[in-house]
Structures are given as structure tokens and as C-alpha cells.
Amino acid sequence: MKLSRRTALLGAATSIAASSSRAQGSGDSAGIQALYAAAKKEGQVGWYSGVLDQPLCDQIGQAFTKRYPGISVSAVKTTSQVAFQRLTEDLRGGTPQCDIFTSTDVGHMSYLIGKQLLVKFTAEGAAGMAKSLQDFDKQGYFQVSWVGQVALLYNTAKVSAADSPKDWPDLTDAKWKDKISFGSPNYSGIVGVWSVAMENKYGWSYFDKLNKLNPLIGRSVDDATTVLNSGERVVAAGNPSSALRSAAKGNPLAVNYPPSGMLVDLSPSAIIKGSKNPNAAKLFIEFLASAEYSQILADAFEQPLRDDVSPPKGAKSLTDVKFFSPTPEEIEKQLPANKQKWRDTFTG
């Protein structure tokens, strides 16, 4: 049977549309495709992020929009404590300005759950994440979206590998007076978790010893990398991903993974109740569980969340290093007091 020109054109248009749909949601289940259709009507998603840096958050947003055209991402990167403060101010005003909140401090999530300010949602893709990251929140309110790490960093142009601090107690050696840097728990969630972990391992006297060495204290855990690059300080407790990323650009930085254990902080993301774009928020949470997102992390020297994505070049996977982390209950109980003790210790 001979087709009319109109029928042929309609058939071609249908084929193109189907091809476009497959390209936009390639591999997605029917449920995620339906979620995309609903999210596309909202057209955007707002993200308050206390992890990564602004360029990488923007890159993740662009990758999400490429996979799901028609939905833009507005990413605002600050430290976790600042992001939480901004969120709570929004909520007091009655309207959250973000749909997704990501923090390095799980205590933030406990607070929001207690106030009934989070939406329960479990991403389909969470089943493909590393087993150690699944069911971090058994209630289903939040999901791991970044594995924060704190290790020992040093400037290789100023400190030899042999002389560099290998384990946490080495950092308190008097030879590092005026040469140390790290962040603050009053601004950075992951530094707050580190403060709890160090207190549990060594007691608060560990920080009293560090204080005697006149450390340079920044805000973010990543500030240590900036300070080491400048040569203003030569050793630090900081983020190995940030240091390796900087070293790949030619900067004189190296990482020591403490044999007694590297701090690992599981950083959650959650959907804010009453946000403007709830379907886009759920789709974004799905994206954060995907292999595509984990590959973006690995390419940026961050820890991937899935076993089917290789760790970044030059880094060690969580299976290759000894690590430790305080429990969410320990963080929630100890961190508020640690913030005040920190102020007393380092400003007194």
C-alpha cells in the first residue's frame, strides 16, 4: 500500500520523538519516565549543597539537565552549616527556596525529621549503590550522595614524604608549630564530624595540643588545600579528593592515609517538604544514585558511590584503606557541645 506524504511525515515525526525520548531517559524504568514527565512540568529544581564546590555542583546540574531536558538546576554551594542556616531561615519565612538539601552533618537531617520537614523517598537507583551506603537512613528520608573523607595532606615542595605526618598523633608534633591548617566545625559539617571522631579516639586533649601549635583555621575542609598550595602552611587535615584534584593540575600536594584510620563521613541529601518542585526533586535524587553521577564524582577525584564505577586515579577505594566514622547518634549528641568547646579552645 502506498503511503501518503502526510502519513510518512507523521511516521517520521513519531520515530524522531521516540528516539529523542530514548536518548533523554535511556535505561530508565517506566516509573522514572513517569516521574520525568511530572518533573518536566515543574521545569526546575533548587539545590542547597554543603558538599563539593560550585563548579562541580554546576557540572552535576548540567549533566542532569542533559539527561532530562526541560529541567534546570539551580545549585547554591556553601559550607554545610551555612546551607543549613539558609534553609532554616527559608523555612521560618514559610517557603523553602530549595527542593534538595545536602549536608555533611547528619544531625541536620535528624533535626529536619523531628520537625517533619522532609519527604520520604527511596530512589530506585539506591539498590545499585555500594552496600555500605545503602539504608543509611532506615526510615527512608535521606540518601547518601557524597562520601566525605579527611586524611593528612602536605606540601611536597616544603615537606619530604619521609618527614610528613603519617598518622593523626604525628600532627601534634611540636615541629609543626605555625605550619598546620584545618577547617572549623562551626562552618563545615565534615570538620564537625572529624572533631567528634578525634575526640572519641584521642580525647579533647588532642585539640588542646593542636592549639599550642598555632594552627591556621579556615572554614571549609577544602580551605586546607588552598593554604597548602600557597605555602602559607605545609601540613593539614583535609579532603584527599581536593588535594588529589589540585595535584593533578601540577600543584605540590600529596596525601597520607592514616594507618589508624581515615575519617569517612557519609553525607546525605533529602527532599524538603513543601518545596516548589517535588517531582523534580525526586528525579534529582534518582540521578544522585546513578552510575552517571558516580562517574562525574570519580572524574573529579571524588569517591564514587557505586561499585560499578572505578575510584579516581591516584586515590584509594574504601576497600583499600582502614576507615572509621562516628555513628549518627554520636554526631547528634556530641557535635553541638564540640562547637562551643572549639570556640573555647581556639579563641581562648
Image: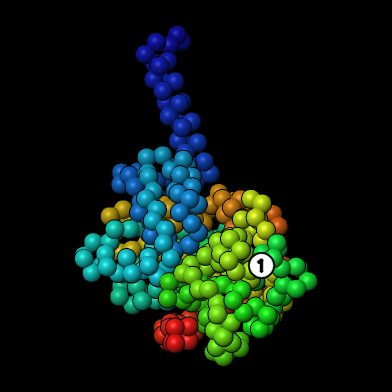
Residue 96 location, quadrant: bottom left
Residue 82 or residue 7, whichever sits in front? 82
Percent coordinates x, y for residue 131 in the rendering: 60, 67
Q: Amino acid at mark 1?
A: Tyr
Residue 276 location, quadrant: bottom left
In this rendering, would 74 be left or right of 257?
left
Find the residue positioned furthest to the left. Answer: 94
- Where 31 falls versus 183 (above or below)? above
In this rendering, would 173 be left or right of 274?
right
Percent coordinates x, y for residue 164 in the rendering: 72, 72
Q: Is residue 291 visible?
A: no
Percent coordinates x, y for residue 243 in the rendering: 62, 61
Instruction: Identify the residue at horizontal 61%, vertical 50% (top origin).
Output: 299
Residue 157 or residue 190, whichever sits in front? 157
Q: Residues within 10 Å of mark 1 (few under 14, many from 20)?
A: many
Instruction: Identify the residue at horizontal 37%, vertical 40% (top origin).
Output: 70
Residue 46 location, quadrant: bottom left
Residue assigned mark 1: 154
Percent coordinates x, y for residue 312 in the rendering: 66, 55
In this rendering, would 206 be left or right of 287?
right
Instruction: Identify the residue at horizontal 76%, vertical 68% (top origin).
Output: 161
In this rendering, would 271 be left or right of 137?
left
- Where 236 falls versus 99 (above or below)? below
Instruction: Identify the residue at horizontal 26%, vertical 64% (top origin).
Output: 90
Q: Is residue 71 visible?
A: yes
